[in-house]
Image: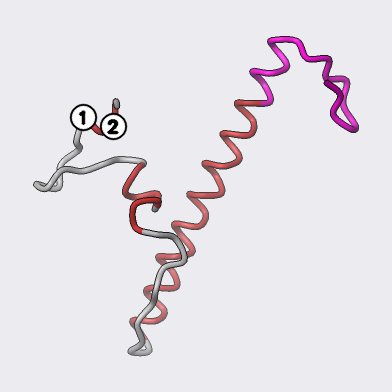
């Protein structure tokens, strides 16, 4: 496999590095969106408006990054499963 601008040859090490890079990038993006959503919700609240998040609740960073049970504590089974 050839990726433009790289010397990637398809080695296992190269595949792992690209995978880690892509996952890290995606996680960083989701974390950024979470902060943006919180900022927009606060701004809307300050002017008396309602904010509708752009990301469904089940996909929000705060939900899947540290899943919580009904008691509000970390749900270890969801986190590890």
Q: Is residue 20 magenta?
A: no
Q: Position of residue 69 (x, y in %)?
A: 15, 43
Q: Position of residue 10 (x, y in %)?
A: 78, 14
Q: Position of residue 13 (x, y in %)?
A: 69, 11
Name the residue carrying label 2.
79
Left or right of 69 on screen, residue 38: right
**Marker count (numbered):** 2
Quadrant of res 45:
bottom left
Q: Residue at x 36, y 41 (%)?
A: 65
Quarter of the image with the N terminus is top right
Which secondary structure, mark 2? helix
The chief SS type of the magenta part is: loop
Name the residue carrying label 1.
76
Q: Nearer the viewer, residue 57 or 76?
A: 57
Q: Nearer the viewer, residue 25 or 78?
A: 78
Left or right of 19 on screen, residue 55: left
Q: Is residue 16 magenta?
A: yes
Left or right of 44 on screen, residue 10: right
Q: Is residue 17 above or below residue 12?
A: below
Q: Local crowd at mark 2 within 10 Å, few (<14), some, or many (≥20)? A: few
Q: Residue at x 11, y 48 (%)?
A: 70
Which secondary structure, mark 1? helix
What's the CA distance linking mark 1 and mark 2?
5 Å
Q: Which region is colored magenta?
A: 1-18
In this view, the residue farthest toward the left is 71
Q: Residue at x 64, y 18 (%)?
A: 16
Q: Are marks 1 and 2 in contact (CB under 8 Å)?
A: yes
In this view, the residue farthest toward the bottom is 48
């Amino acid at each position: 496999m050839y990726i433009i601008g790289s010397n990637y040859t398809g080695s296992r090490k190269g595949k792992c590095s690209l995978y880690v890079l892509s996952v890290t990038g995606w996680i960083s993006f989701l974390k950024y969106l979470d902060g943006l959503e919180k900022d927009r919700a606060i701004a809307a609240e300050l002017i008396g408006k309602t904010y509708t998040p752009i990301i469904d609740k089940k996909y929000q960073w705060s939900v899947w990054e540290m899943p919580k049970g009904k008691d509000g504590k970390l749900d270890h089974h969801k986190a590890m499963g």
